[in-house]
Image: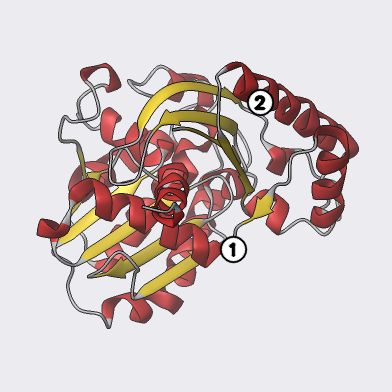
Amino acid sequence: MRLGVIDVGSNTVHLLVVDAHRGAQPLPASSHKIDLRLSEHTTDEGEISEAGIKRLSTFVGECLTVAEDQGIEDLLAFATSAIREAPNGEAVLQQVRDETGADLQVLSGPDEARLTFLAVRRWFGWSSGRLLCLDIGGGSLELAAGLDEEPDAALSLPLGAGRLTRELHGDPPAPDDIRALRKRVRSDIGRVVREITRLGSPDRVVGTSKTIRSLARVTGAAPSDQGPYVARSLERAALSELVPQLAQMTADERADLPGVSASRAPQLLAGALVIEGAMDILGVERLDVCPWALREGVILRRLDWLEA
């Protein structure tokens, strides 16, 4: 069957179309996305602005048209931290529903972590043993660990690359801002690290998300055009060397790095500070990069619910 997923994230709104059936690998058929950056369309009170809501509704409407044109049989639509945390989030959902007919379901932070963990487990398989998964988006950082398809611990912290970039002023950012952000990131992770480390040492540590893929590419991982089956990783030592370099670059200079898009370049430093901090505190030397993440986890869970 042909499935579609509309993912309303803090950075992008993305329609992914896949051909799949229960027990089979979902095969991407098409993709339609926009860098909407909902987290930047907020008022001083943290509400999503009317302009942001309008852009969201317009693009969701486009996604529905594309889904129909692509012959999608089942369409799943969900939203993450940008709408989850907005005081007017329910009103946003209602307006999108009224204008497009799309019923966006808001995922909790722990559910994001669980579904991403499911995707990682299915990608790497049971031979990977105990998994630890790190996923960073525009609004939050998810951590999950466990032996099975359902993690034993699933956490979400408000440490997204887009959110934290707003705390860095200047281009390149002021050193005092970078230092303060580094300290806060590590303090926030340190408060919850016991929930992960109490489960024992992982056999494999995995990173997902565009930010981690970009950091891996900058530090020497294979480019995306070599396909999803090429092994890619992000080494802590290489990342620790990269962070001071990113701190001295402008956003335009970061955009010239391999694997870094102009739209993601402003957030790369904040994302690197979060991932470096998490790897340090968790004692992780290397992240294996997984091409599957939250969207694939949503699809896999939906397929699991289909009747055999």
Q: Which residue corresponds to the image point at 53% horizontal and 59% vertical from the top-left?
A: 180
Which of 270/118 is in front?
A: 118
Percent position (x, y) of residue 219? Answer: 24, 33
Residue at x-position 72% and y-position 26%: 59
Q: Can you see residue 113?
A: yes
Tag 2–tag 1 contact (CB < 8 Å): no
C-alpha separation, residue under disc 2 versus residue under disc 1: 23 Å
Residue type at mark 1: give it: Ser
User: For the view shown, which residue lies furthest in the left direction?
Assistant: 127
Among the two numbered marks 2 and 1 on one chain, the one whose residue lies closer to the N terminus: 2
Q: Residue at x 43, y 77 (%)?
A: 192
- Name the residue nearer the viewer: 117 or 268: 117
Residue 191 percent location from the top left of the image: 45, 78
| 186, above or below 73, in the image | below
Q: Nearer the viewer, mark 2 or mark 1?
A: 2
- The number of numbered badges drawn on the structure is 2
Q: Residue furthest front?
A: 308
Q: Which mark is residue 55?
A: none
Mark 2: secondary structure: helix
Up-down relation of residue 87 to residue 22 (above or below): below
Q: Residue at x 22, y 57 (%)?
A: 205
For label 1, the crowd category at 10 Å Cα-Cα, with few meaning under 14, some 14 to 19 and many 20 or more, is: some
Query: Could you say where residue 251 lies in the image, as x and y percent from the top left?
Result: 52, 26
Dot 1: what SS? loop
In the picture of the structure, the residue carrying the numbered disc 2 is: 63
- Residue 34, x across and y down, in percent: 62, 24
Location of the N terminus by quadrant is top left
Specify whether 81 is left or right of 257: right
Q: Amino acid at mark 2?
A: Cys
Q: Residues within 10 Å of mark 2 (few under 14, many from 20)?
A: many
Mark 1 sits on what residue? 108
204 sits left or right of 31 in the view: left
